[in-house]
Image (cartoon, grey):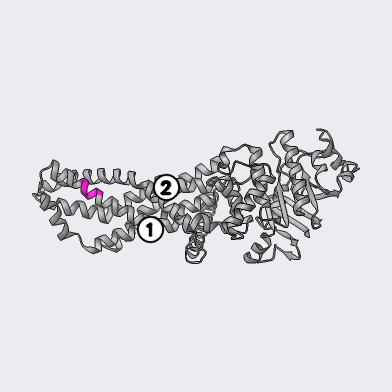
């Protein structure tokens, strides 16, 4: 009994210490975003890496998400004789929920893991130490460009996901299931408010921060060896995904 | 001048440095020798402020780097060049940009000056024509030379070498040693070399310090160390299995 309590206590202390460490890391990184000198080239490089290179997979997942969504919603709406609501239902689901979440989870798997692995390898091969030894701040070179790029890229990728998803829904609803094109889009205009777009935007910014923060942190403080990098990469993806879903619920419930 | 006073460092229950004392004069080349896992690299990392000691002082040109803030520590770091064990070259940029990196980011020089300096230093370390290659595309020996070039390109006052010849064949080993001697003559830096190359390192340095069980047990010229009567030093230098050194502790 005593041992179990000790174990729980130990884990709680480790959890609080790690949480505090991660929070300080985030605060430091956010401060450096606003303090010059800015590494604009590295920022653009990360925009290309996180954003441009994720476009194809985002387009692919967006298309099929929209198509599946239209198929399932159409099936349900037909039971109530409300097929005309397909457009707004697809659009609202994508804009408020699926667009930000699925694009964030996709980028976590594609770019987040790569960021952790790259920074982690830099750590174990002493490249980060080399920066510090040159009296240079590694946050400016490795962390700030990633976080700043994520702020820009995540909302854009989410917007692209939403548009492509709605078009995917259009293909299924209009071209395959026979709904009229006018019904699909006109109902959408009526039911999708600016506040729905705002929610999607806030979520995507929040998810961008989560993914870049956790990926950079896990890489920066990786343990040694190939196993350490692999463990950090897995942890970064799992933790980012969990945080995305938790914050998705919190933001969603706040705006309900 | 570098002055290390009573340096202590522990990791969890393991006490690695137990009161290291050493003085290194300006422009002197000193080798730190000792057992593998004996704390040599830990000692070197303290000199550049990558590790903070539990106790003790490291005074570099009158500044105790264990007591200064980050900004002041960075000012002292400007005096250093470091050759890391594996080179620590940046994977994502080519050799030219690796060597140019401290000139661009630390000294913020103009591109034409950078080009001239990088070309000069690469010529000096015998690496002309590989500027466009990436670190993964060159051999281990070349990487060590590039690391040396990057450390020297800013003409630092102090250069730290963390096992600069590990994993190299005897010919490359001698070429790196000769390079250290030549560049030391040209630039006149203070050098601290962590090394296992016995007896080769004795031809390179002015003094040798033997780190054993977390303390410097003997310091002297290569000749003095070679003729040492200290049983531990003798055992280490001869490299025989049986002797006074305790292994596997």
The residue under label 2 is: A111
Q: Nearer the viewer, residue B91 or A67?
A: B91
Q: Which mark is residue A152?
A: 1
Check if residue A182 falls in the magenta segment.
no
| Residue B45 visible in this rendered orientation of the protein | yes
Task: Say above or below: A250 vs A165.
Answer: below
Q: Is residue B8 left or right of residue B208?
A: left
Residue B239 picture quarter: top right
The chain identifier of the residue carrying mark 2 reads: A
| Residue A17 visible in this rendered orientation of the protein | no
The magenta span reads: A164-168
At x 35%, y 52%, the residue is: A245
Q: Which mark is residue A17?
A: none
Magenta stretch secondary structure, dominant: helix
Residue A66 rendering spot, x and y as whole percentages: 23, 46
Residue B233 picture quarter: top right
Q: Nearer the viewer, residue A195 or A144?
A: A144
Task: Say above or below: B178 vs A23.
Answer: above
């Amino acid at each position: 009994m005593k041992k179990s309590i000790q174990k729980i206590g130990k884990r709680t202390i480790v959890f609080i210490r790690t949480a505090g460490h991660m929070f300080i890391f985030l605060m430091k990184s956010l401060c450096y975003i606003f303090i010059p000198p800015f590494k604009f080239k590295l920022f653009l490089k990360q925009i290309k890496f996180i954003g441009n290179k994720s476009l194809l997979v985002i387009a692919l997942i967006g298309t099929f998400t929209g198509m599946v969504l239209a198929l399932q919603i159409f099936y349900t709406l037909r039971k109530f004789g409300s097929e005309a609501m397909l457009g707004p239902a697809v659009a609202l689901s994508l804009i408020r929920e699926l667009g930000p979440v699925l694009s964030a989870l996709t980028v976590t798997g594609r770019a987040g893991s790569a960021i952790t692995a790259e920074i982690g390898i830099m750590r174990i091969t002493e490249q980060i130490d080399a920066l510090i030894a040159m009296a240079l701040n590694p946050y400016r070179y490795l962390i700030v460009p990633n976080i700043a790029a994520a702020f820009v890229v995540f909302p854009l990728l989410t917007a692209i996901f939403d548009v492509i998803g709605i078009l995917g829904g259009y293909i299924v609803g209009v071209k395959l299931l026979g709904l009229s094109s006018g019904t699909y889009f006109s109902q959408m205009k009526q039911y999708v408010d600016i506040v729905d777009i705002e929610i999607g935007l806030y979520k995507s910014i929040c998810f961008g921060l989560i993914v870049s923060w956790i990926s950079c942190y896990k890489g920066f403080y990786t343990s040694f060896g190939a196993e350490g990098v692999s463990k950090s990469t897995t942890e970064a993806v799992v933790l980012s995904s969990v945080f995305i879903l938790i914050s998705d619920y919190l933001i969603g419930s706040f705006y309900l | 001048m570098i002055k290390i006073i009573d340096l202590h460092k522990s990791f969890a229950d393991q006490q690695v440095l137990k009161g290291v004392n050493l003085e290194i004069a300006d422009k002197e080349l000193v080798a730190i020798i000792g057992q593998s896992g004996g704390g040599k690299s830990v000692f070197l990392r303290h000199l550049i402020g990558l590790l903070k000691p539990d106790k003790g002082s490291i005074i570099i040109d009158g500044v105790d780097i264990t007591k200064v803030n980050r900004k002041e520590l960075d000012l002292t770091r400007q005096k250093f060049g470091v050759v890391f064990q594996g080179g620590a070259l940046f994977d994502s940029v080519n050799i030219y940009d690796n060597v140019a990196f401290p000139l661009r980011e630390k000294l913020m020089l103009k591109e034409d000056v950078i080009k001239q300096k990088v070309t000069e230093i690469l010529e000096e370390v015998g690496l002309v024509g590989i500027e466009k290659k990436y670190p993964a595309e060159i051999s281990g020996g070349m990487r060590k030379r590039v690391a040396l070039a990057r450390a020297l390109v800013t003409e630092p006052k102090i250069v730290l070498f963390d096992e600069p010849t590990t994993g190299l064949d005897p010919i490359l080993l001698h070429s790196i040693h000769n390079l250290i001697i030549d560049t030391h003559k040209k630039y006149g830096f203070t050098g601290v070399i962590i090394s296992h190359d016995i007896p080769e390192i004795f031809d390179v340095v002015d003094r040798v310090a033997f780190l054993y069980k977390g303390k410097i047990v003997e310091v002297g010229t290569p000749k003095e160390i070679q003729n040492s009567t200290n049983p531990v030093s003798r055992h280490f230098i001869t490299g025989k299995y049986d002797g006074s050194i305790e292994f596997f502790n």
